[in-house]
Image (cartoon, helix red, strand yellow):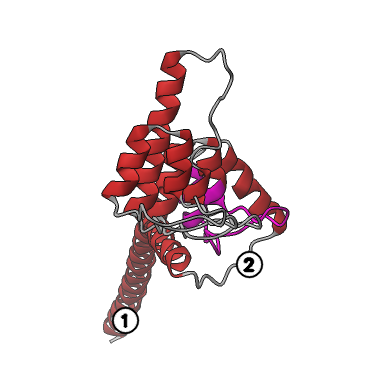
Amino acid sequence: MGYLRDKAKNSQLFDAEMEKNHAKTKEKLRIKGESAAMKTRVYFDTLLGEPIRQSEKVLSDRDHILNNNSPYKDSQKEIDKYMKNISLGRHHYVGFAASTGFESINYQEPEWGNSALHLAVKKGHLLAAEELCRYHADPNLKNRLGYRPIHEAWQFWNTDFNRTWEEREAQEKLTCDILVALLSYNAHVDAVDLNGHTALHIAARLGPVTAVKTLLSFKADSFLQSNDGR
């Protein structure tokens, strides 16, 4: 009888130990599974998820700037930096400003009221002007002197008497290209400055003939008179 009791007791102990080992193994498998799942999430976040979130943010911020309803408030320092980059012809900065949630593409500097598009046109930066137009910069904003960007398409000219024929031809072509860019994005072809001058008045006075033809092709009114009757 004693032998049988010991055998039964040993069997119970063995079963208990087996159940205990089974529970440990099950727990290890659970921990290992959770660890693998965590590694998968980390991998996705670092290699896939973060780029996807960044892309979504870029698209969201671009919508903000195009709709002019971004929640961001730009500091004067950021606005000055934006204006400076446009003045230097850094057209890629337009997209950068949009992707970082810049609140407005139409900020006007306080002294003369020039917008970024005014500055790009005045400096002869065609690519910057085109990029600003693509991001819905207003081509009809007036500065404090009453000039719209279309009136500024001759400001970058080198009028030095000693300039070469090639230099003159290049700057005249650039003016025509800028006019086409502005007019293609709904610049008002007959917009007048404070003196009643349209871009056609300026083109007829300064040239080139191609600029006159360009403006007329966009239905410029050749009968409009300026304030001095011209």
Labels 2, 1: front one: 2
217 over 42 or under it: above or below: above
Where residue 196 appears, as percent x and y from the top left, is 53, 57
Of the two numbered discs 2 and 1 on the same chain, state the one appearing first in sequence: 1
Q: Which residue is mark 2?
A: 73
Identified by mark 1, the residue type is Gln
Q: Which residue is mark 1?
A: 12
Residue pictured at 40% horizontal, 61% vertical: 53
Residue pictured at 28% horizontal, 87% vertical: 1
User: Is residue 54 magenta-colored?
Assistant: no
Element marked by disc 2? loop
User: Is residue 94 magenta-colored?
Assistant: yes
Crowding near the residue tagged with mark 1, few <14, some 14–19, many ≥20 C-alpha atoms within 10 Å: few
Q: Where is residue 3, by image quadrant?
A: bottom left
Left or right: 163, with 108 as reference point? left
Q: Nearer the viewer, residue 212 or 104?
A: 212
Where residue 159 appears, as percent x and y from the top left, is 56, 24
Residue pictured at 38% horizontal, 61% vertical: 59
Element marked by disc 1? helix
Crowding near the residue tagged with mark 2, few <14, some 14–19, many ≥20 C-alpha atoms within 10 Å: few
Q: Where is residue 66, by image quadrant?
A: bottom left
Q: Nearer the viewer, residue 1 or 202?
A: 202
Where residue 104 appears, as percent x and y from the top left, is 54, 63
Left or right: 96, with 3 as reference point? right
How far apart, in angstroms, are the residues tagged by discs 2 and 1? 74 Å
Span colored in magenta: 92-118
Left or right: 118, with 223 as reference point? right
Left or right: 117, with 58 as reference point? right
Identified by mark 2, the residue type is Lys
Where residue 16 appears, as percent x and y from the top left, is 34, 78
Tell me if I can see residue 89 in this picture. no
